[in-house]
Amino acid sequence: MRKFGTHLLIVAVAFVASGACSLDNATGPAPSSRDGRSILFVGNSLTYVNDLPAVLAALADSAHGEKLDVQSVAFPDYGLEDHWAQGTALAAIRRGGWAVVILQQGSSALPESRINLRQYTAKFATEIRKTNGTVGLYMVWPTSDRPFDFQNVIDSYTIAAQDVGGILFPVGAAWISVSKRDSSVPLYAADGLHPTIEATYLAAAVIYAKLYGKSPIGLSSTLTLRTGVTVLIPPRTAAILQAAAAEVTGTSGSNPGL
């Protein structure tokens, strides 16, 4: 069994060479509830590097077996407009069965990219609601050389979520919380854009907390993914990440189910 610890980007898990689309069958039957609540991610490498969907599923499973059937449609450098034109994500959404569809694109900090995010979030939201799904927005972060853009990123994703009455997953805000707690926790990979495994764990903790309305504090820091890879986060670091996720999601306190 392969293991990945702190400071190491899980490239092997992330389908990085050519991008990723982990959807089993975009045009086949709708996902089944037998494997737990069905979640679809629509995004780019900020979703598939380190396999965030798999980390989220493993994190939920570690919480006394809370099951998620998590799949994704994610390609390199894609925004929601690209997904709308390409069609795979739309086909998956239209077949139905998703409890939540989580949308993600780049930082969307600039005024024109905020407009684009809002426009295509609204388009996707219309299709998601036709199948009784809920819209989610996975708030990301600016590149490491533009820390002054954090508030613009937060505002863009917050407004887009408010536009459609969707769930906001404030991951970018959690990055700020982590940095205030301990700036030595590595969140940026060497390229200054992609997440480290710590940052992906943080994202999963934020999404878990919002999906279940439960605190991520006390969740496991050792996860076995569906690929067979084991993710190891040092307990002290995991505690910082969990506390930040709890802060931004308003789920402070330990998880009563743990």
Image (tube, helix red, strand yellow):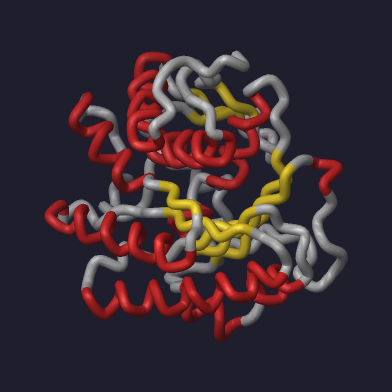
- Work out whether residue 128 or residue 61 is closer to the camera in this orientation and state it: 128
Please identify the quadrant where the N terminus is shown. Answer: top right
- Counting from the top left corner in percent of width and height, residue 21 is at 64, 63
- Work out whether residue 50 or residue 212 is closer to the camera in this orientation and state it: 212
Q: Is residue 64 above or below residue 177?
A: above
Image point (20%, 54%), residue name:
151
The number of discs equals 0
Using the rendered view, name the quadrant where residue 175 is placed.
top left
Left-right relation of 233 to 113: right
Q: Residue extending furthest left?
A: 148
- Counting from the top left corner in percent of width and height, residue 109 is at 24, 66
Left-right relation of 19 to 67: left
- Work out whether residue 99 or residue 181 is closer to the camera in this orientation and state it: 99
Image point (60%, 14%), residue name:
258
Using the rendered view, name the quadrant where residue 8 is placed.
top left
Left-right relation of 153 to 57: left
Image point (48%, 25%), residue name:
215
- Work out whether residue 6 or residue 58 is closer to the camera in this orientation and state it: 58
Tell me if residue 175 can be seen: yes
Tell me if residue 8 can be seen: no
Using the rendered view, name the quadrant where residue 114 is placed.
bottom left
- Counting from the top left corner in percent of width and height, residue 156 is at 30, 64
Left-right relation of 170 to 35: left
Image point (59%, 75%), residue name:
126
- Counting from the top left corner in percent of width and height, residue 220 is at 55, 19
Q: Is residue 219 above or below residue 159?
A: above
